[in-house]
Image (cartoon, rainbow, N blue to C red):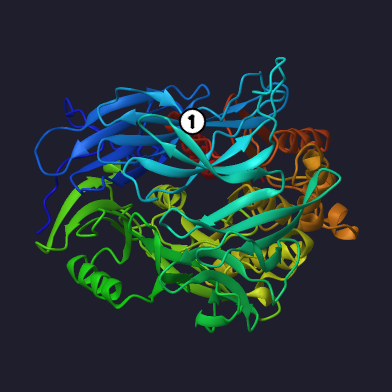
């Protein structure tokens, strides 16, 4: 039985017939941005959007008809809520963050504890002695174990910063990341892992014991991209070598640990197998025995699926044309089979959270034409109740189906892609948008996409190519990444446009390209290499100059990693669209937030300057106080309206 309990937001009743505002509906942030289930399975806490970048925290009962109660808000200037989860049946922890710009752009975060009714709010302060901090501490901590054995306690990674002395020995002198056991009600703190300057990752067994630590390699103050992992045998304290990873190179021997199974006494992780990432387990008894758990012959294993408050591993995830999971746990396999039968129209199913005993589960389900809805599944009663919609504004909207296709690149390689055809059209000789994804270390997946759906609602066919340089398809497909192998990646993108025209789907006079982040880079670079192909170019938060991209990272700890990723050589100058703005013939429209930590706004400003100098038709829209993701519903709606008008405008001949 599916019974709707409540919406995440209350929608005002229309005064009369209203025209559907597609830009507003598709541009709206998700009404439920994050949700968690209480340990007893009777309540949920969720984060909903507020005004601008603001957020609101709600708690709702699942067993009664009471409306959700708002227990906290932030205004987004700069405080925003990343997540809220239950530390106990009565206590919540919420992660609040913001981007500050003095003296330079940086993220600051804090963990807030509060009762389920919003009372007794406290910031979980850093471990302090008697002196003042000798340097700023922007990191508010991270929860790594929600169930360490005592109700209301959590294990947290916390950054220790030395303090000034006060004539006593009470000042805190330690530095680096350590692990503390935190009582979220009394705020008593007990250190369980001493801080270390090179410690960047801790992995527990889900029951309160730290079993793995990752220590970063550092050179001249910059992270090198290497991590040395060590482990403890069960019941012991001494660290022993486990593995070493390097994000700047491909290494078939590198085991990247993700989780620990205390029952089997193994670590689960990813390792390369036949040129693709696969799921392995590694014994934590000192033998170092590695066992292949799951590998797919065509695509990478992308990670692991977890369940329960202990976050135990129950399967491995991968994506062919559709995201999938291979389950290790027979009980979970039966559970997913049951849910699939109950929700035949919603093939994408994910267990978001569960009660302590796993008898009640919070489930998300969606599809290409359904942006998602949440259900409460009672395993004992075998009852499924619909709880809320991810995007209630779109509940009555007509969606366009997304189809997985392949098309040939110039060298004959078949490129996987997703084609979204507008409804009510024969699909011939119509306006089109090629939409390359960001990253470039990423890929598109089958499912609801608010950008693709909006442009389809405006009459455009949308093609999203998983060009070579995308992740998920193995090492050979990734090549040297989308920057160092830009000629191949961009060639695949432009071939997507040519295929649309050749197949008679796209009107060649109305073929456009639009992308975000690396996708914005791909849009601009495609306009450089194929200036007569795309008639209009939209780039959101784009990289435009690879030399500048490396230079921009010099003030950050990842400078070495970024430099190695971009590389050196002729491809850097040749692959920078800002250095070839004079080759672009199509009108260009760009958008960028001025507190973007991923891609500095200077990239778009440089591109605009070069385009204007070349006499090109271009416009840059800047958003004050917004970051890379432009998480403001009104801003996104305005951007969608402006791009639709831009893409529909007649092109000057």
Image x and y of residue 481, in percent: 72, 64
Residue beneath the point at 76% across and 51% down: 562
Residue lying furthest top: 167
Residue 214: image x %, image y %?
A: 64, 56
Secondary structure found at label 1: helix
Residue 574 relative to residue 196: left or right: right
Q: Residues within 10 Å of mark 1 (few under 14, many from 20)?
A: some
Above or below residue 268? Residue 602 is above
Relative height, residue 425 to residue 454 (above, below)? below
359 to the left or right of 571: left
Circle 1 residue = 635
Q: Is residue 83 left or right of residue 396?
A: right
Residue 150 in percent (x, y) is at 34, 46
For this orientation, the residue located farthest to the front is: 168
Q: Is residue 266 visible?
A: yes
Q: As drawn, is 546 to the left or to the right of 171?
A: right
Establish if 299 lies above or below 157: below
**How many marks on residues?**
1
Q: Which residue is more in the foreground, 132 or 602? A: 132
| Quadrant occupied by the N terminus | bottom left
Q: Residue furthest right?
A: 569
**Of 507 and 125, which appears nearest the observer?**
125
Q: Quadrant of residue 283?
A: bottom right
Q: Which residue is at the front of the view, 486 or 173?
A: 173
143 or 372, nearer to the observer = 143
Q: Within the image, what quadrant is residue 250 found in?
A: bottom right
Q: Is residue 651 visible?
A: no
**Where residue 184 sits: x, y (%)?**
38, 34
**Quadrant housing residue 626:** top right
């Amino acid at each position: 039985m599916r019974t709707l309990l409540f919406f995440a937001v209350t929608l005002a009743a229309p005064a009369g017939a209203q025209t559907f505002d597609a830009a507003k509906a598709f541009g709206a942030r998700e009404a439920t941005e994050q949700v968690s289930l209480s340990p007893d399975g009777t309540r949920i806490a969720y984060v909903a959007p507020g005004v601008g970048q603001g957020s609101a925290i709600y708690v709702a009962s699942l067993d009664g008809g009471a409306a959700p109660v708002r227990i906290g808000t932030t205004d987004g200037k700069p405080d925003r809520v990343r997540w809220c989860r239950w530390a106990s049946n009565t206590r919540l922890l919420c992660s609040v963050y913001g981007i500050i710009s003095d003296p330079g752009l940086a993220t600051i975060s804090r963990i807030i504890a509060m009762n389920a009714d919003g009372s007794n709010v406290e910031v979980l302060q850093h471990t302090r002695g008697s002196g003042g901090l000798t340097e700023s501490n922007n990191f508010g901590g991270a929860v790594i174990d929600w169930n360490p054995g005592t109700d209301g306690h959590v294990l947290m990674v916390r950054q220790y910063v030395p303090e000034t002395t006060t004539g006593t020995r009470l000042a805190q002198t330690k530095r680096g990341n350590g692990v503390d056991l935190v009582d979220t009600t009394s705020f008593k703190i007990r250190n369980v892992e001493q801080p270390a300057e090179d410690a960047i990752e801790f992995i527990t067994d889900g029951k309160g014991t730290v079993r793995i630590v990752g220590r970063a390699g550092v050179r001249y103050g910059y992270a090198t991209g290497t991590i040395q992992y060590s482990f403890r045998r069960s019941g012991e304290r001494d660290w022993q070598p486990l593995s070493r990873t390097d994000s700047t190179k491909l290494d078939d021997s590198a085991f990247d640990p993700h989780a620990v199974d205390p029952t089997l006494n193994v670590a689960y992780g990813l390792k390369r197998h036949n040129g693709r990432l696969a799921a392995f387990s590694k014994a934590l008894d000192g033998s170092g025995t590695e066992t292949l758990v799951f590998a797919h012959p065509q695509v990478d294993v992308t990670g692991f699926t977890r369940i329960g408050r202990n976050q135990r591993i129950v399967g491995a995830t991968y994506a062919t044309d559709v995201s999938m999971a291979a389950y290790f746990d027979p009980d979970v396999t039966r559970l997913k089979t049951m849910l699939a039968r109950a929700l035949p129209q919603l093939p994408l199913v994910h267990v978001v959270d569960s009660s302590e005993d796993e008898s009640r589960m919070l489930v998300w389900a969606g599809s290409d034409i359904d942006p998602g809805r949440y259900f409460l599944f009672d395993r004992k009663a075998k009852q499924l109740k619909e709880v809320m919609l991810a995007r209630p504004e779109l509940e009555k909207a007509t969606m366009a189906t997304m189809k997985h296709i392949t098309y040939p690149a110039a060298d004959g390689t078949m490129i996987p892609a997703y084609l979204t055809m507008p409804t009510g059209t024969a699909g011939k000789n119509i306006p089109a948008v090629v939409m390359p994804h960001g990253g470039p270390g990423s890929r598109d997946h089958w499912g609801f996409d608010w950008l693709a759906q909006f442009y389809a609602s405006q009459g455009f066919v949308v093609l999203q190519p998983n060009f070579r340089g995308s992740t998920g398809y193995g090492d050979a497909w990734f090549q040297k990444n989308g920057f160092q192998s830009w000629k191949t990646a961009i060639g695949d993108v432009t071939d997507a446009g040519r295929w649309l025209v050749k197949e008679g789907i796209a009107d060649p006079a109305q073929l456009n390209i639009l992308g975000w982040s690396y996708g914005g880079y791909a849009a601009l670079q495609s306009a450089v290499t194929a200036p007569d192909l795309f008639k209009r170019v939209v780039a959101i938060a784009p990289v435009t100059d690879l030399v500048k991209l490396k230079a921009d990272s010099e003030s950050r700890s990842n400078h070495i990693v970024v430099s190695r990723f971009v590389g050196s050589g002729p491809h850097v100058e040749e692959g920078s669209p800002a250095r070839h703005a004079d080759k672009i013939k199509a009108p260009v429209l760009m958008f960028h937030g001025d507190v973007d930590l991923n891609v500095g706004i200077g990239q778009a400003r440089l591109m605009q300057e070069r385009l204007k100098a070349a006499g090109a038709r271009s416009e840059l829209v800047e958003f004050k106080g917004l970051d890379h993701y432009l998480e403001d519903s009104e801003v996104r709606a305005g951007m969608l309206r402006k791009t639709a008008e831009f893409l529909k405008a007649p092109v000057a001949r």
